């Protein structure tokens, strides 16, 4: 069978056509199979799911933005809006650059002016090391959260714990590097 043009250019040719083998259990388990049309029952199930999620979306947006559900459903729909339209529909409060956004988040967290942005260190490795790393299969807890020789009046973390902190997003008040010295 051959198809002219399209994504594959000159098309695809096979001897004896393309065969399909379906292995599934239960009604609708192979929904989305490209070799058959969905049944009316399957389309009804999908539509009910979409309608349910859309209703939850409308309720959430209306409640959290102080809007009438009819306005969200009938005027806004589920479109993606640019900044000006999002402001018009009261979907956003403001637009800030990165620094102003961080300052606003620090204010919401009641950190005051003395806060530090701590970024996780991203390990640079190959695909295999990324796939096999503990961050994909669950972190291993460090043997000890505090060092064996604590500094009076200050928590001191061992090397394994400090290494873990560098891999995870962290909200911390003060100088986080002091914990690892």
Image (tube, rainbow, N blue to C red):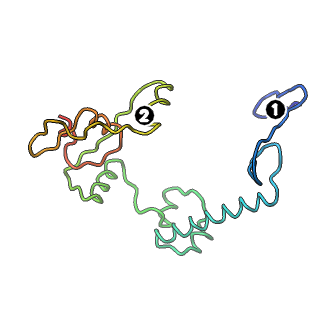
| Separation of residues labelled 2 and 1 (CA atoms) | 46 Å
44 vs 106, left or right, is: right
Single out the residue that lies furthest toward the right. 16
Instruction: Choose the circle earlier in sequence order: 2 or 1.
Output: 1
In the figure, 74 relative to 7: above or below? below
Residue 164 position in % (x across, y down): 32, 37
Q: Secondary structure at mark 2?
A: helix
Residue at horizontal 31%, vertical 48%? 99
Q: Which residue is mark 1?
A: 5
Question: Local crowd at mark 2 within 10 Å, few (<14), some, or many (≥20)?
Answer: few
Q: Do the residues bearing badges 2 and 1 touch, measured as CB atoms within 8 Å?
A: no
Question: Along the line of sight, which residue is nearer the eye, 166 or 119?
Answer: 166
Question: Along the line of sight, which residue is nearer the eye, 155 or 171?
Answer: 155
Q: Quadrant of residue 23?
A: top right
Residue at horizontal 45%, vertical 62%? 92
Which numbered circle lies on residue 78? none
Between disc 2 and disc 1, the foreground one is 2
Which numbered circle lies on residue 134? 2
Residue at horizontal 79%, vertical 60%? 41
| Image quarter in which the N terminus is found | top right
167 vs 162, left or right, is: right
Residue 63 position in % (x across, y down): 48, 71
In the figure, 90 relative to 2: above or below? below
Q: Quadrant of residue 155?
A: top left
Residue 37 position in % (x across, y down): 83, 50
In the figure, 177 relative to 114: above or below? above
Residue at horizontal 25%, vertical 32%? 159
69 vs 37, left or right, is: left
């Amino acid at each position: 069978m051959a198809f002219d043009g399209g994504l594959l250019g000159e098309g695809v040719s096979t001897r004896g056509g393309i065969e399909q083998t379906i292995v599934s259990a239960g009604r609708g388990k192979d929904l989305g199979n490209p070799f058959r049309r969905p049944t009316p029952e399957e389309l009804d199930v999908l539509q009910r799911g979409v309608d349910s999620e859309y209703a939850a979306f409308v309720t959430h947006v209306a409640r959290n933005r102080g809007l009438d559900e009819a306005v969200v459903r009938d005027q806004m729909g589920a479109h993606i809006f640019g900044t000006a339209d999002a402001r018009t529909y009261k979907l956003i409060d403001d637009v800030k650059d990165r620094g102003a956004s961080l300052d606003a988040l620090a204010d919401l967290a009641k950190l005051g002016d003395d806060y530090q942005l701590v970024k996780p260190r991203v390990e640079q490795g190959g695909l295999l090391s990324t796939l096999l790393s503990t961050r994909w299969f669950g972190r291993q807890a460090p043997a000890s959260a505090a060092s064996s020789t604590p500094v009076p009046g200050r928590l001191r973390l061992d090397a394994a714990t400090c290494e873990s902190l560098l891999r995870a997003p962290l909200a911390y008040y003060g100088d986080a590097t002091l914990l690892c010295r």
